[in-house]
Image (cartoon, rainbow, N blue to C red):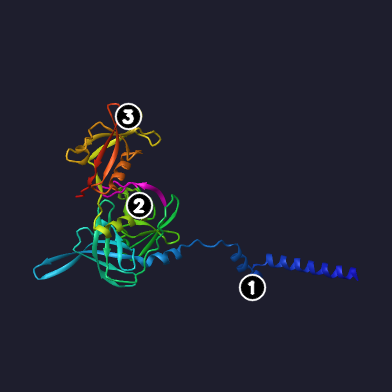
Amino acid sequence: MINKLKFIFNSVAYGLAAALIVVIVNPELRNNLGINKLTTNVMRPAAMSFASAVQQAAPSVVNIYSVTSSRQLANPTDKINDLGSGVIMTSNGHILTNYHVVDNAESILVHLQDGRQFNAEVIGLDKVTDLALLKINANNLPTIPQQPDLEPQVGDIVLAIGNPLNFGQTITQGIVSATGKKGLTPGATYSDFIQMDAAINLGNSGGALVNSQGMLVGINTAASPGTNNGVQGIFFAIPYQLAKRIMNKLLEDGEVKRGYLGLEGEAINQVGQPVRSTIESIAGIRLHYVDPLGPAWRSGLKQGDVLLAVNNKQLVSFAELLEIVEHVEPGQTISLTVSRNNQIIKIDVEVGKLEID
């Protein structure tokens, strides 16, 4: 009996093995049995897609048209002067865009992705960061997903959403190439802009830069000045946290009030030479110009002084000094630690207001 069972099991095993070999070597038979489709689905890796991120963020990115009126006798015409994009930040119609998109516009048109159109009011402008805050008369609008503590990292995947060349909403993809970059707008002293390689073109300005989850990373602002000369893949965005801070100030005051000292200088090393490398240690900031009408001059600062610290915080660059001062409310007093003639002194300065042309 046992021998009969062994014979049966062996016969079945040999039969299955032979059938498997026939299926493997016969493509037509594999197709008929659906094995090719099964194995392909099992072995094929899942395709990477950012469709979910786009679906969350795209409805809150709008098209913006700056309009100027040209009246010739009795034949008035409207001319679109500038093209850009914007990001809906609140459900009741606050929209962030770029300053250069709406500067000097007589009227501003906002086109939503659902087809609705609105005239926009300018709440405030900030030339330094190239930001503008607009308001449209609407409620229950889709808002861009926001994460207050979001900190973009070099290498993060980002998606730029906007209306390039008025082609309609378009998505481009890239990575964060660097952070802490100086802005490109005239007079800009902030040095925490995002550099990335997601392509932005005319019309993308003011649009959203989001991550792979659809969270707002920044407001797209500019391409590298060398883009037209063969430079590729260098674009900039205003970080979300900076943009939100500027938005709140514009909501509160209609402007951004920045501190001003009225001085210029450069970082020096321990032997008093200009710092030329990022690995050199910095001894302080040597002043080579003090505005005779500025707060620093009135408080006694002189050309040749070396600034060591602001409010006991050691300085690492002149750009850092400017950023610290810009965040101080005009009229407040700061304490400067200064080296003069080999002596360390303290000088209190009442911060003035930075005026932007």
Reply above or below: 102 against 8. Answer: above
Residue at the spot 62% in from the left edge and 68% down from the top edge = 38
Give the image quarter of residue 19. bottom right
Give the Cα separation between the discs numbered 3 and 2.
34 Å
Residue 265 horizontal/vertical position (percent):
27, 36
Above or below, comparing residue 247 to residue 316 in the picture:
below
Q: Position of residue 49 (x, y in %)?
A: 48, 62
Few, some or many C-alpha atoms within 10 Å of disc 2 (few <14, some 14-19, many ≥20)?
many
* Mark in the foreground, 1 or 3: 3
Identified by mark 1, the residue type is Asn
In reply to whether residue 310 is colored magenta, the answer given is no
Residue 241, x across and y down, in percent: 36, 54
SS class, disc 3: loop
Label 2 is placed on what type of residue?
Phe
The numbered mark, 1 or 2, whose residue comes first in the sequence reads: 1
Identified by mark 3, the residue type is: Gln
Sequence order check, earlier mark of 1 and 3 = 1
Vertical placement of residue 109 versus 283, above or below: below
> Magenta segment range?
174-191
* Helix, strand or loop at mark 1: helix
Give the numbered dot on residue 79: none
The answer to whether residue 50 is left or right of residue 101 is right
Label 3 or label 2, whichever comes before in sequence order: 2
Residue 32 image label? 1
What residue sits right under mark 3 in the picture?
273
* Mark 2 lies on residue: 235
Residue 239, x across and y down, in percent = 36, 53
Q: Is residue 93 left or right of residue 13?
A: left
User: As rendered, which of 4 and 203 lies closer to the eye?
Assistant: 203
